[in-house]
Every structure is written in structure tokens, then in C-alpha cells.
Image (cartoon, rainbow, N blue to C red):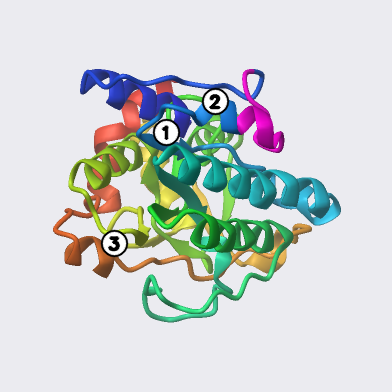
Amino acid sequence: MLGHDLLDVLRAADADVVPLRRTDLDVTDAPAVAAAVRGADVVVNCAAWTAVDDAEAHEPEAFDVNAVGAANLARAARAAGARLVQVSTDYVFDGRASAPYAEGTPLAPVSAYGRTKAAGEWAVRAEAPDHLIVRTAWLYGAHGGCFPKTMARLGAQKDRLAVVDDQVGQPTWTRDLADLVVRLVAAGAPAGTYHGTSSGQTSWYGFTRRILASAGLTTPVEPTTSDAFVRPAPRPAYSVLGHDALHAAGVEPIGDWAARWDAAAAEVLAG
């Protein structure tokens, strides 16, 4: 989702961009990464093992992509004199907070996915002084599967839905995240960590109600708890990220999640 939207935003800005798919570049292959990055001004790492539940049983493989791959890109970017944008996640936190996570909050991942992404952040900080780590969460977009598409499909198929109401976060459109990445680079934002999520907050239950309304569906939705949907990887109960670093850099955060969903809904649900 993010790769497609980032490419669209960059091309709209007439940027000279070279997109590399997984079949074009294996980020765990250090020599190949070094060759691919040579000559670049900015490198954006959209590659990641994002199968959160599968990572619990395949942590070494997830580590290869999320940590070793990030380290390879960081070393290559430093050698090329390029700025590295590393996309990270709310899963580097434990999800037990009750106020938005600040960018400098100590990392405390509780899942394999979170641990491997945290290791990727550490590698980038150690190997690429000119970096922008951009944490995001609850992504949806037109390209590929995502929560809104799944819930709209289920809402059209089922008589009733039960959705967890005890996990809170910030639904974020990948087009908005792509735009934020480009704005951060264009602004010459200081190296460091930023949070690339929509403003405001809601639960999966609240988001589902908004999704079904956008899809023109009246399927009843009942709130339930995480205990009803036990998964291999623990989900953060609280995934709300603060945006103080963006404000300090003079970069406008993404707007309120509900307004951004209204702007995105037709494109996402048609995709």
C-alpha cells in the first residue's frame, strides 16, 4: 500500500524516483543493497515483514527483513551520502499507555514483530546518522488488503459483526503517510524519530462503524473485547502516537482520522 502511494506522490512532484520491488532487490543481500543505493539522495525503506502473527513462529526470518535489511540499507545510505527514511511501527511500544506516546518513549515491544522492528530502528540510528525514522500504525490504502476492505466485505456478507472496542489507535491512509514522508524530506527535517499517524483516535469498533457507513451498509456492529479474538501475537491496547517532533520541525501532522477516512473511503473501498 505505502510503496504504491509513495510512488504516486513522488511522481506527482516530478521527483526522479527508482522503485524497487521485492523481486528487484533483496534487502537482506548487503552487496545488492549497496549497489542499488549508490547514487541516491534519499532512500525510503518500505520493505518489511508485516505478518504480525506469522512473525511469532518465524522471528529469525522477520528479523532478517526488519532488522538486518534495515541495517544493510542504513550502511548503504551512509556510504552513498543519502538520507534514509525508515518506516517503523507502534508495535515498538507495549501498548499499555493512557496518553499519546512521545517519540522518545523507551521502546518496550511485546511481540516478535515489535522486537524486530525495534531492532531495525536501533540499526538505523547506529549506522545512518542522516535518518528519519517514521513510526506509523493502523494503515489502510487502495493497494492491497487492509482492515476497511475486510470489514466492508464482511459487512456485505454477514447479518451482524462483532469488533473489538478495547484497542485504540489512529487509522492512517497510506497516501497521507506518503505525503508526510515527502514533506519531511522537503523540509529538511532534523535527523530523528517522527510519528506518521493521523490525529485523533478511535477503536476498531468505532472505525468499523465509520467504514460500513461509507460503504452504504447498515449491518449491525457489536462491541466486544480482545479476549474474544485471541491471536498468536499480542495487539497493543493503546496505539496513539504523539506528534510533538513534527511540530518542532515545522511540519504539519496528518489531519483527524475521521476526516481523512472520509477523503479516502471511495478510493480505498473501490481498490
User: Residue 55: image x %, image y %?
Assistant: 76, 51
Image quadrant assignment for residue 180:
top left
Q: Is residue 26 left or right of residue 205?
A: right
Mark 1 and mark 3 in contact? Answer it, CB < 8 Å: no
Q: Which residue is mark 1?
A: 217
Residue 251 against residue 14 in the figure, above or below: below
Please name the amino acid that badge 1 sits on: Leu
Visible in this render: residue 219? no
Picture residue at 67% right of the left edge, 32% below the top: 31
Range of magenta residues: 24-33
Q: Which residue is mark 3?
A: 200
Visible in this render: residue 161? yes
Picture residue at 70% right of the left edge, 68% below the top: 227
Residue 90 against residue 158 in the figure, above or below: below
Tag shown at residue 36: 2
Q: Main secondary structure of the magenta part?
A: loop
Please name the amino acid that badge 2 sits on: Ala
Quarter of the picture containing the C terminus is: top left
- Quote the CA–CA distance across marks 1 and 2: 46 Å
Badge 3 crowding class, 10 Å Cα cut-off, few under 14, some 14 to 19, many 20 or more, is some
Chain-order first, disc 1 or disc 2: 2
Residue, far left: 250
